[in-house]
Image (spheres, helix red, strand yellow):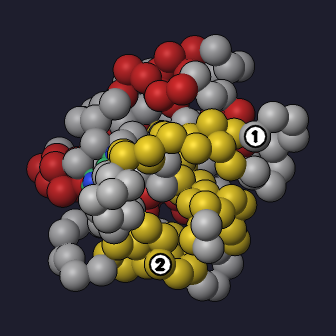
Amino acid sequence: MLALQGDVEEHLAVLQRLECEPAAVKTAAAVRECDGLVIPGGESTTIGKLMERFELTPAIEELHTQGKPIFGTCAGLILLAKEIVGSDQFRLGFLDAQVARNAYGRQVDSFETTLSVRGIEGDPVRAVFIRAPVIERVWGECEVLAEFGERPVLVRQGNLLGGAFHPELVGETRVHQLMLDMAR
Ligand code: GLN
């Protein structure tokens, strides 16, 4: 669990309910010890600046090239994306996706809904959107696992999982389980 800024505790609470040993990490050495990484929601510019300041990018790139699962929610998704509309802010740029920050518009700035997610059986997945990014388009190997309206809101590309919403704020564990299932 990347613990630079954002809703780290809520993610840890979900991970503690699953079969894994979550740890809050904020140094390159600690990142290198991980079998996977969750990048939380928060403020993508702040998390990005801290990633640069603490020189975490090479360590996160190593996890990625080793095929370890990386799950970004909201700000975390923005940091994973290759393209961010109208912004040159820092990003990891692993995911074949274009996102637009805060693009759900004022009326629906924050909202809760349920989603049907490919690969998750049973009840619909509860999802909270908070000043969420819109996934404008995906390409290459990036596949859409869930949509809200016409737009992708959960995508997967190999070992990468990106969600525009927060499953962790409503006690939803199945999206994190999906990430754990991606571990080789
Ligand atoms: N609006 C934030 C950003 O652009 C993301 C919001 C969130 O993570 N809930 O970074």
Name the spot of residue 48 as percent of width and height, x first. Answer: 22, 55
Q: Which mark is residue 136?
A: 2
Which image quarter is the N terminus in?
top left
Amino acid marked by disc 1: Pro
In this rendered view, identify the residue nearer to me: 175 or 15. Answer: 175
Lower sequence index among marks 1 and 2:
1
Residue 181's place in the image compared with 80, above or below, is above
- Above-or-below relation of 122 to 50: above
Q: Which residue position is annotated with label 1?
A: 124
The one of 24 and 9 positioned closer to us in this rendering:
9
Q: Kindly indicate the quadrant of the structure image that contains residue 156.
A: bottom right
Q: Crowding at label 1, few (<14), some or many (≥20) Cα neighbours within 10 Å?
A: few
Identify the amino acid type marked 2: Glu
Asked which secondary structure carries label 1, the reply is loop
The answer to whether 174 appears left or right of 7 in the picture is right
Res. 155 in view = no
Picture mark count = 2
Q: Nearer the viewer, residue 108 or 13?
A: 108
Residue sitting at x 64%, y 14%: 17
